[in-house]
Every structure is written in C-alpha cells, then in structure tokens.
Amino acid sequence: MTDETATEQDVRAVAARARDAAVELATLTRAAKDGGLHAMADALLDGADAVLAANRRDVEAGRQDGLSEALIDRLALTPERVAAMAQGLRDVAGLPDPVGEVVRGYTQPNGLEIRQVRVPFGVLAMIYEARPNVTVDAAGLALKSGNAALLRGSGSAFRSNGALVDVLAAAAEKSGLPRESVQLVPGTDRSSVGHLLRARGLVDLVIPRGGAGLINYVVENATVPVIETGVGNVHVYVDRSADLDMAERIVVNAKASRVSVCNAAETLLVHRDIAEEFIPRVLTALGEKGVTVHGDESFSRHEEVVPATDADWAAEYLSLDLAARVVGDIDEAIAHIRRWSSGHTEAIVTRDLDTARRFIARVDSAAVMVNASTRFTDGGEFGFGAEIGISTQKLHARGPMGLPELTSTKWVVTGDGHVR
Amino acid sequence: MTDETATEQDVRAVAARARDAAVELATLTRAAKDGGLHAMADALLDGADAVLAANRRDVEAGRQDGLSEALIDRLALTPERVAAMAQGLRDVAGLPDPVGEVVRGYTQPNGLEIRQVRVPFGVLAMIYEARPNVTVDAAGLALKSGNAALLRGSGSAFRSNGALVDVLAAAAEKSGLPRESVQLVPGTDRSSVGHLLRARGLVDLVIPRGGAGLINYVVENATVPVIETGVGNVHVYVDRSADLDMAERIVVNAKASRVSVCNAAETLLVHRDIAEEFIPRVLTALGEKGVTVHGDESFSRHEEVVPATDADWAAEYLSLDLAARVVGDIDEAIAHIRRWSSGHTEAIVTRDLDTARRFIARVDSAAVMVNASTRFTDGGEFGFGAEIGISTQKLHARGPMGLPELTSTKWVVTGDGHVR
C-alpha cells in the first residue's frame, strides 16, 4: 500500500484528545472499566463482519505487495481469531485493578501521613507490527490500567486496525467511557511515528513491540519515555556439572518449542569438560527437530554443523537455527553472554550451587533461569494473567510486564497544617 | 574558563571502564561498600587541602568570568563544607543496602520458583550544576547502590570536582574496590555531554540535576534512559473551606522558607468565596517576608501587586516572587494546575473531604499535599535518609528518589528441569 503521512498537528491533535480522555479514565472505578471491557468484547463479536471485511482488504493488498505467507498468516483474521480477541478482553476484565493500590504508606514522626499510590500513566502509545490482535490486547490492558491508548500498528494492517478501533471506541462510548479511550495514530509512514515520539507533555509512555529495527528507531527518535521490549538473543549454558538428560531437554525446548518468540534460545554454550559427551547427543536431538547448528571449531567437527562467525553470536535468528560454542569455564560463559546478549533471558543447567549463584549474580539480564527453559520468561508463565510485552531495559520495568507495570505512582501527603 | 572538548572515543572509553567496574560493584557485600564509603570519608578529610586549593582556583576563575556572588557562594568550599561531605558519606554507609532485596517471590503451580530481586543499574551518569558537594553525594549513593558513577558537573567547578574524584577514586582503590567506581566524564562542553547521552549499552541511566535548560537538553539528546528531575512550578490552592490561619502559614512557608529549591511554591490559587477575606492578609504576610506578588485582576487591585501575564503562570521563579490568581471553584484550580504545572508538587488547603479527594484524584503531579506545605516533598522529610533528586517523570521513579530508586530488578527463576 501507499504510505499515508500525517502532519505533526494531526498527531498532536489526536494525542491531545487522548490526554483529555486520560483525565476521565484515571478516576474510573474498576466496575466501570470492566463494564467497558465486556462491552468491547460484545461489540467485537457483533461487529465481526466489518472487521473481517476490512481484514480481507488488508490481506489482498498484502498479497499484491508480495508479503510472505508467514506474514499473511499473522495478518489474517478468522471468526475464531476475533472470538479469541473478545475472550482476551473478558480475561483482562477478570484481573485485579492495579490503580489505587497503596504501594507504601507510613506516618512520619511529625505526624505527616505519607502514601505512595498507583496511578495510571495517562496516555500510553503502542507501536507494533503485523498481528491485529495486539490492537485489541493493548486497548484492553490500557483501559484496565486507566490509560488512554494511542495505537500504531503496521501499515499492512491499517484497515483491520481501523475497523477494530472503530468497534472498540464506539463500545467504550456506549458504555459511558470516553470514545477517545482508544484511538489509532493517523498516518502509516515513519514521519507520523516521529511526531508521536516527540509529543512530550501529551504522551506519557511509548512501548514499541517488534523487531530490533523498530525498537532502535523508537529509541533513537523518542523524547517521550520509552520501554524497550522483546529483542531476545537468549543463551543456554550447560555446565560441567549438568544433568545431561535435563540439559538436552531444556536446550531442545528452549530452541525448538516455538522459534519465532523472543524467549527462544539463540546460542548454546557448553562446558569443555562435558563437550565430548554432550555435543553428539544434543546435535542428534536438535537435528530431529530440524535445527541447524552454527558452531565453533568443537561443534563444527561434526559434519551437520555450519561454522559460526561473529554474526551468529549476535543473531536473534527467530528460526530453526542455533549458534553453539564450547567454553572453558563458567566465567568464559558469563563473558560471552555479557558481550553478546540483548539482556532478555539466559539459562544455566547445573547441579553445582556455587556455579548457579555465580551465574545468577553476574549475568545482567532481565531473567536468569536455573535448570528451567528460557521459554518461561512470559507474563502468563509468571502468573501475571496478561502481558503487554517483555522489557529488556532496566528502567521502570524489566522482564514480563503486566498491568501494574502500566502504572506510575503518586505521593499523597496529608497533614493538619504542617510547615517546615 | 575555556571549554575543553572530549571526543566520542574519550567519553566511551571512560564509560567502558565504568561498565567493567560495575560488574564488580554489583556483587559486593554491604560491608565492603560501607567500608569503601568510610574510606572515602577519611580520605576527604585527609585530602581537604588539595580539594580546597583546586576549589580556590575555580572560585578565582569564576570571579574573572563574572559569576554572580550567589553562584560563587554555591561553588566555594570551606573546611566545614568538606567535613559535611565526609559526614554525608558516613550517613549513606548507615543506610540499608537496597541490592538483593527480594521485591516479589512466589512458587508457580508447576513448582517453578520465581523471585524478583533488586540489582544495581550498572553505570549511573549524573549531570549537574554548580555545587561540588553533589559530586560526593552522587558518588556515595551510586556506590551504596552498587552502581559505577560517571559524574559531569558544571565547567565552573571542574577543578574542584576533579580533585574530589581523585580523592574518592584513590580511596576506593585503597579499600579494595575498583578505582573506576567513580569517574569524571572528560570535557567541559556540551558536545562531551552529548557523547555520554548517546552511549547506549555503556550507560544504563542518566540523571540530570539542574535548571529546565539542562533537563531539556538531556531529554532532547539522550538515547540512554533518563530520569527528569527537579523542575518545580509548584502550586498552593486555598479552598473556600480552608482554615485561613493554616492557609496563611502554609502559603508563607511554601513560598518563603527557602526560595531557591524545587519544592518552593510559585503560584497561589485562591477560591473566589474567601478571596476578599484572604487576599489582604496573605499579601501582608508575604510582604513581611519580602515576597513580590504577580496577581490577576482580583489581586492586582492591591497596589503592592504586579499584574500577572502568562509568563508568570509558567514561571519557576526560584526567587521571592509568587504568581497569584482567584479561581471560581476546585475544578478551575485543577484545570489551572494541569495547564501550567511541571508535575512536581501541588498543595490544597481545605476542610472539605470531597474537595480534598477530588484534588488528590485529578491533580497529576508527583506529590499532592493536603493541609501541608509543598516543602515536604523531599527525601529527608519522606524518611529516605538520602536523596539523589526529585523525579518529575512517571517512568520508574516519581517524586523523591532514595537508594532503592537507583536500582533495577532481575527475575531469578529456579526449576528442576522445567520445560514447556
């Protein structure tokens, strides 16, 4: 499709309406927000025909533009997928409301009462790629956390997202919430995104979800606060003391159970002392799953292994490929990870307590797994009930982000005429 | 002085050394860090002569460059001020270590043990103006929270800061900590700061402390995460139901107890129904403190009041000036605050519970005071024991920041071979 551009004025006008909506959303009761979520779910089912028609036009345009079948599959909606989105909204309605939680509260010696209370950010912008279900997920999570949502999906899903937001906004209005609780950012080109990223004072937080290119573009251009998400160059280290059956099971699960996700393993590190025993069996197990191994000298002695270069250590394959290397000790494993990791998730398989403690202490990533698959770095697996993304930065939220991570706090201080 | 520039390579080299030091600092025990803090305090007292000599050269250069006497006073060190800095380090040693705190911890139904643990950010950069004591405060707070410090003070204090960092780094090394635990950023011009602000992967967090100009420069140019601090366009709203004695006491304290600080009041809003009674008495009380009031029509009927313009509503005076306006009701007060506030602190004086609740819910600032002076937004007054600054942003930390706000978290997940 042809990119449509939007002026800074267009984008700021939409953001200003979100800002006004946010004032109302911040003080809604949980009952009002949950009512809105169920109304949105009902409206999605009722309006499925319009959504599916818009989606068919996106799919046709995508085919004409030569999108891969994998991307077409991510883009395409079915009545079942629409029903699943509606159910997702009902699930979010079932979660506790993070807003109003008193995080800390105490009384100072002078009698001043101090409370730190969770409050919505205000205006939450999401920039994401392909799947139209993110539009509905993000709108639901934003509403539940009391934030107005500004949504910017990919150009290839522009019609689908437009139809979805029309349905959701109308349902919000009908249930007494601001219609501007959820809005699409105008325009489909990068310059429109740029205006959004520089709307200080109007946008409180931007969360990009997508590949490294999108994340980098957002970080380089934003003056509003950003949470970086989801780039996972994920490592599994098999220690000399590892239970090799367990190690094989974890490596295969971490790499091959689902390859397109950010918590999938991309590099395997094996301790030298067990390399001779472990390498052949793990290559066999990975081979059975169709995994191509890109290995160092020790690995590439085996004919099925492709010799690795630095590009392999850096790669987030998101495919049936795995980089693999032998290391002399735990510190060499840690140094490799510190050099190449994107700070998402790393796992160690070991039976040695000191080694586990050293790995935990010195690996600087959002999640460190001990004798567990890297695939567990996930809001659902962590018990959050919903996930907006996985933060790979250290500020504000790190790792899977649930509803509380979509809130800020406010200090409420009550006295009876206190001065200092 | 003439600005000295530093290349991107220079700045990145210093940051890379900080990154290496941070690996060691992250795993230090509290005892080791407290030992380092006391060693730094001892060294400051022992090395006071060198510090004072360097400071005299800064003061002389400042006088030649025409710095105001107020700025010279902020810059100048005395033996007593050096002793106070040393005592500050000992006070930080007395505070609990935030690192290692388990923020959340639970076991999932499948037996997976999940813990969220406080960890240092890694490399913490501070950019600040004038006072050399910030150099020592920041170094101490960074060390206690396990972070390597990259410090960038103002050019006018360059020699003082250099002497202080020499003393602190040598003391760190002598007590077994990395010498690069605390380093000065090379160069004194803005382009050196620019390199620092774009050192993604080397710098984990930048905290600017200074005026709006500095904060804006940092936000506009940073690609590393930033916490905005300390710009305070602070409001006091006196409701129709207020105890007017209390209101007068709070307004005078909020404005006049110390004018150069970010929690000082800059605008007074008065409910129309009590304006006739309250305005004359608050003008008298403020006049006795030497405050000039810049008022709307209601206020400027009084001859001592200067008529206000929009520039006054926007101003962070940091002086004996106060903007003042009459409002028709609580919502007009809230709208004025939402329009003009910097989101730092706002206070209401009221006896009405509904009004207080409405103000708390709808004012979107880091701290909301009910019947208390705005001057209480302060790490010490909140009982934090130490303060690195007051965040006016919503991401990560909002309001006064103590040691825990200088940490991130890491998820540690332990299984016994868990796969999914």
Image (cartoon, coloured by chain):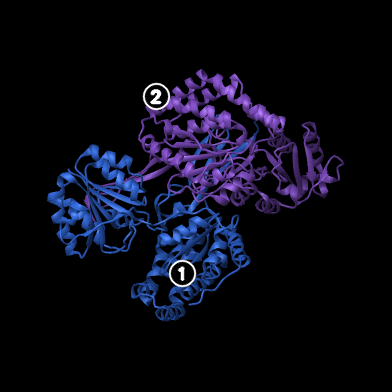
Chain colours: A blue, B purple
**Amino acid residing under circle 1:** Ser
SS for dot 1: loop
Q: Position of residue B85 (x, y in %)?
A: 54, 25
Residue bearing the label numbered 2: B175
In which quadrant is the C terminus of chain B drawn?
A: bottom left
Asked which secondary structure carries label 2, the reply is loop
Crowd tier of the residue under label 1, counting other residues whose Cα lies within 10 Å: few below 14, some 14–19, many 20 or above: some
Q: For the residue marked with disc 2, what is the amino acid? A: Ser
Q: Is residue B37 above or below residue A315?
A: above
Q: Is residue B179 left or right of residue A169?
A: left
Q: Nearer the viewer, mark 2 or mark 1?
A: 2
**Which residue appears at 59% of the width and 22% of the height?**
B53
Question: Within 10 angstroms of label 2, few (less than 14), some, or many (20 or more) residues?
Answer: some
| Front in this rendered view, residue B400 or A65 | A65
Same chain under badges 2 and 1? The reply is: no
Closer-to-camera residue (A55/A313): A313
Relative placement, left or right, of A274 versus B356 is left
Where does label 1 land, which residue? A154
Q: Is residue B397 shown to the viewer in this render? A: yes
Q: Which quadrant holds the N terminus of chain B?
A: top right
Residue B415 position within the rendered picture, expressed as x and y whole percent measured from the top left: 24, 48
Residue A317 vertical position relative to residue B144 in the rendered view, above or below: below
Find residue B370 and report its horizontal and vertical position in percent.
63, 41
Report which quarter residue A216 is drawn in.
Answer: bottom left
Q: Numbered disc 1: what chain?
A: A
Subunit bearing disc 2: B
- x, y percentage for residue B2? 63, 37
Q: Residue at x 41, y 54 (%)?
A: A402
Task: Return the residue nearer the eye: B80 or A416.
Answer: B80
Picture quadrant of residue B373: top right
